[in-house]
Image (cartoon, rainbow, N blue to C red):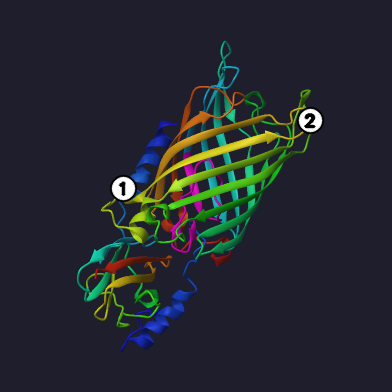
């Protein structure tokens, strides 16, 4: 029994210490921050994930309260930052904006999400 | 929404995409409905087919009304056969301590289940699953109370995240509930002159996802490991319906917490008896639960139908 438990603990630690290159990609943080209020329009919206992303299957968009897109349609994973997704946005008027994203991690698991941020009057 | 097939390498990427598209996992595995992630709960059966294994789950039950107490070490496997069909299998080693009697230990009855993913509604963060579970007679040690009859249990498991609530109530949106509704039909009316009643079983898990709070509602500054926590309360009841035992209810209330990482999750809950028939005092349970679809994403973590 003790040997089994030792093997279990060792296996768990090995998995827990594995390089973070697989598994589902969860949103770690964003700029503008999720649910934040800004005084000025940001030039881009950037998302950082917990796993590296597959470019061909990852995308995002930003819409205003009327559902109209306000991004520049240039979503990209910046060179050298494989867990980041960013997109440029037009100058944003005061209001609430919805960020919608869908990504596939490099091991093929898809995840998606939405959040809002505000531009203060 | 545009994918990043911008300029230049379009043809090359399209070829890669064609190769990968058959490999992309579906959102059913691992408890997703849209942007909502449901962790595997300890007491409440999950509303999704999955490739996961609990190894182990250690339970120290509260003392029963007669003063006896059981401790169990349990293993449970969930495996997808196709993206929408799965099965479960589980068993436990159990130790029974009774006042004034020698300790008894051994294997409990084998449990299996067949599951069908009825629906996954991403926008409404809702899941529904139909299952048929079986606890097999003559597969466990009788001295531990393992049955000499098989019990068949059709169930409906569901999950609902409240992320679709209005954004005017942001801090309610991380809440989610999962639940089971089912019946237990014993295949034998009596055992050793004791009735085996048909029972109605129901249980719920009320959980608050700090992960969902951070990703989709409000960044309050939590970072790993705190943004991967799910405080929850689980309840489970079973009410006998016939054979002279109608209305007798047993059940537990289990407050606890789950931490969900990229490859496994760890959960711990207190066990509080909810009725006098269940017992008194308190117990506890801890569970180490692995996501096979994340650990082995290109092999045994996929549905069996996609192995070839």
Which residue extends farthest front? A121
Query: Which secondary structure is most common in the magenta stretch?
Result: loop
Residue ranking furthest to the top: B100
Above or below, A20 against B67 in this view is below
Q: Nearer the viewer, residue B211 or B190?
A: B211
- Would you name the residue on which mark 2 appears? B243
The answer to whether any part of residue B292 appears in the image is: yes
Q: Nearer the viewer, residue A107 or A91?
A: A91
Q: What residue lies at 47% left-to-right and 53% top-to-bottom?
A: B38
Indicate the position of residue A18 as horizontal and vertical percent values. 31, 54
Q: Magenta part of the protein: which range?
A: B31-56
**Residue occupying image coordinates x 35% and y 42%:** A10
Q: Which of the numbered marks, if any, corresponds to residue B226?
A: 1
Q: Is residue A29 magenta?
A: no
Q: Quadrant of residue B119?
A: bottom right
Q: Is residue A83 visible?
A: no
- Pinpoint residue B303: horizontal percent, then vertical percent: 55, 61
Q: Residue furthest left?
A: A40
Q: Chain of mark 2?
A: B
């Amino acid at each position: 029994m003790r040997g089994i438990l030792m093997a279990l603990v060792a296996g768990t630690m090995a998995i827990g210490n594995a390089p973070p290159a697989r598994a589902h990609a969860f949103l770690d943080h964003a700029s503008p921050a999720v649910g934040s209020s800004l005084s000025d329009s940001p030039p881009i919206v950037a998302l950082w994930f917990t796993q590296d992303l597959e470019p061909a299957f990852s995308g995002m968009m930003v819409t205003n309260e009327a559902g109209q897109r306000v991004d520049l349609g240039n979503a990209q994973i910046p060179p050298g930052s494989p867990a980041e997704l960013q997109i440029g946005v037009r100058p944003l008027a005061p209001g609430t904006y919805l960020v919608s994203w869908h990504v596939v991690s490099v091991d093929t698991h898809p995840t998606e999400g939405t959040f809002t941020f505000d531009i203060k009057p | 929404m545009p994918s990043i097939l911008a300029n230049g390498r379009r043809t090359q990427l399209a070829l890669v995409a064609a190769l990968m598209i058959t490999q992309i996992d579906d959102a059913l595995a691992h408890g997703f409905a849209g942007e909502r992630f449901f962790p595997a709960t300890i007491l409440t059966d999950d509303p999704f087919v999955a490739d996961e294994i609990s190894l182990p789950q250690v339970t120290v039950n509260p003392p029963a009304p007669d003063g006896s107490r059981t401790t169990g070490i349990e293993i449970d496997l969930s495996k997808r056969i196709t993206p929408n069909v799965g099965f479960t299998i589980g068993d436990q080693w159990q130790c029974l301590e009774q006042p004034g009697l020698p300790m008894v230990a051994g294997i409990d009855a084998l449990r299996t289940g067949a599951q069908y993913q009825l629906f996954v509604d991403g926008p409404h963060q809702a899941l529904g699953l139909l299952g048929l579970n079986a606890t097999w007679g003559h597969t466990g040690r009788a001295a531990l109370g393992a049955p000499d009859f098989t019990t068949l249990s059709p169930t409906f498991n569901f999950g609902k995240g409240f992320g679709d609530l209005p954004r005017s109530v942001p801090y309610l949106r991380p809440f989610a509930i999962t639940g089971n509704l089912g019946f237990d039909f014993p295949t034998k009316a009596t055992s050793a002159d004791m009735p085996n009643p048909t029972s109605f079983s129901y249980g719920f898990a009320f959980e608050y996802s700090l992960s969902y709070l951070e990703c989709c509602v409000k960044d309050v500054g939590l970072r790993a490991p705190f943004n991967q926590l799910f405080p929850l309360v689980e309840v489970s009841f079973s009410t006998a319906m016939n054979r002279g035992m109608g209305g007798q209810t047993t059940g537990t209330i289990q407050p606890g917490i789950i931490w969900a990482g990229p490859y496994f999750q760890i959960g711990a809950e207190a066990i509080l008896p909810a009725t006098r028939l269940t017992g008194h005092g308190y117990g506890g349970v801890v569970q180490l639960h692995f996501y096979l679809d994340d650990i082995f994403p290109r092999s045994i973590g996929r549905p069996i139908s996609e192995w070839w």
